[in-house]
Image: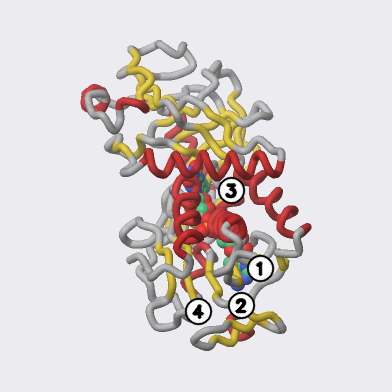
Amino acid sequence: MHRQSKSYLIVGQGIAGSLLAWHLMKAGHSVTIVDQHHHESSSMISAGIINPITGQRLAMTPQFDVFLAQSRKTYSQISAELRIDLFVPKPIIRVLRSAEELARCYDLNTTSAAKPYIAGIHKPGHYGVGIHDPYGTLTIAQGGYLQTQLLLTSLKKYFLAKGMLIDECLAYSDLILTNNRVQWKSLTFDAVIFCEGFKANKNLWFKNLPYSFAKGEMLKIEFESASLPDAILCQQQWCLPTQKGTYLAGSTYDRANINTIATPEGQSTILKGLNDFIPSKVRVIEAYAAVRPVMLDQKPVVGMHPAIPTVGIFNGFASKGILWAPYYAEMFARTTLPPLIR
Ligand SMILES: Cc1cc2nc3c(=O)[nH]c(=O)nc-3n(C[C@H](O)[C@H](O)[C@H](O)COP(=O)(O)OP(=O)(O)OC[C@H]3O[C@@H](n4cnc5c(N)ncnc54)[C@H](O)[C@@H]3O)c2cc1C
């Protein structure tokens, strides 16, 4: 085993806990994961999209190149080792809503950060009559989506086969912490790292961090008549073709109702936003809801507790867990027990 190898207990096997476990294991550390059957996991319903240019203002994600490089590396490594195809590259077509948005696209196309991600700025009608695009479209390159459910269920099997995963809910009262050891039931570790998603607001050691969770709803749908390009389409809402002929569509962003219940209001927000650029009848097949673990400053919270060196957190991946988690997991595993980044 690695000379400075440590033993970690990881709480949570969403995208955060899974990738942290993977990178710690690959760095030679001993890892035990405890997960409550993916209960209310945000990762299990995530659309898995990686998109360099997002938001109302068509903003380039800061340091996208760095995050993308690590994402590609991590997901290809897991794909190769587990013999599954995880990342599906797809063009992303942003349907523009105004002359200002169109002008913004031309501006973006002059910046060195965004230029490699712009595949075209197209006139109305370029993608056919299935899309309502009076101001044209921006086609974004190097995006796509991760098959997140496949990743989590495959990694779960992999971790179980290696005896690394315990399928249960960890109770904080079962943990005994000292300055250099963590005891959980009969097992001892150098550290426990919490990757609990939005359950972190109940965590004894981290419940007072500045959380600003956001519920998100999403639908599985079928279009009745639209003939659409094989791409992720987006405006205020987005839709993503799945491999089974259906689409995922979403999503809402609700800071007021932090629960995992799909609602008629959420459904109607998504369908209305979708209808603005895809004027086809839609059949709803299924509705989902989960809570994004978001911090007030929208940045991840990664590292060890300032007063208790055996307790850490790896959370706050907001709407960018698929892009960000590989980078922070690799960094965490490389530095081991880093001070809290805040
Ligand atoms: C509708 C929607 C769409 C989204 N789409 C995208 C997207 O396209 N791209 C993107 O990058 N991000 C997207 N996100 C955000 C993404 O889902 C999150 O960034 C990511 O899933 C957070 O992962 P996590 O591992 O931190 O949390 P979670 O996925 O919530 O995982 C937490 C895990 O901890 C476990 N757990 C908690 N407490 C305990 C305990 N006491 N004992 C044992 N286990 C415990 C739970 O069972 C769960 O499995 C979307 C989110 C939503 C809601």
Q: CA distance from mark 1 to mark 3?
A: 24 Å
Sequence-first tag of 1 and 3:
1
Say which quarter of the image contains residue 161. Answer: bottom right
Q: Which residue is mark 1?
A: 32
Q: Quadrant of the N terminus?
A: bottom right
Seen as rendered, the residue at the extreme right is 161
Q: Which residue is mark 4?
A: 310
Other residues around mark 2 within 10 Å, as few (<14) / some (14–19) / many (≥20): some
Disc ID at residue 45? 3
Sequence-first tag of 2 and 3:
3
Sequence-first tag of 1 and 4:
1
At a point 58% along the width and 68% down the height, the residue shown is: 3
Q: Is mark 2 within 8 Å of ligand 1?
A: no
Secondary structure of the residue carrying tag 4 is loop
Q: CA distance from mark 3 to mark 4?
A: 31 Å
Disc ID at residue 189? 2
Q: Position of residue 205 (x, y in %)?
A: 46, 79
Q: Are marks 2 and 4 in contact (CB under 8 Å)?
A: yes
Other residues around mark 3 within 10 Å, as few (<14) / some (14–19) / many (≥20): some
Q: CA distance from mark 1 to mark 2?
A: 9 Å
At a point 68% along the width and 52% down the height, the residue shown is: 155
Sequence-first tag of 2 and 4:
2
Q: Is mark 3 within 8 Å of ligand 1?
A: yes
Say which quarter of the image contains residue 93. Answer: top left
- In-image side of 132 versus 34 (left or right): left
Q: Are marks 1 and 3 in contact (CB under 8 Å)?
A: no
Q: Nearer the viewer, mark 2 or mark 3?
A: 2
Q: Amino acid at mark 2?
A: Phe
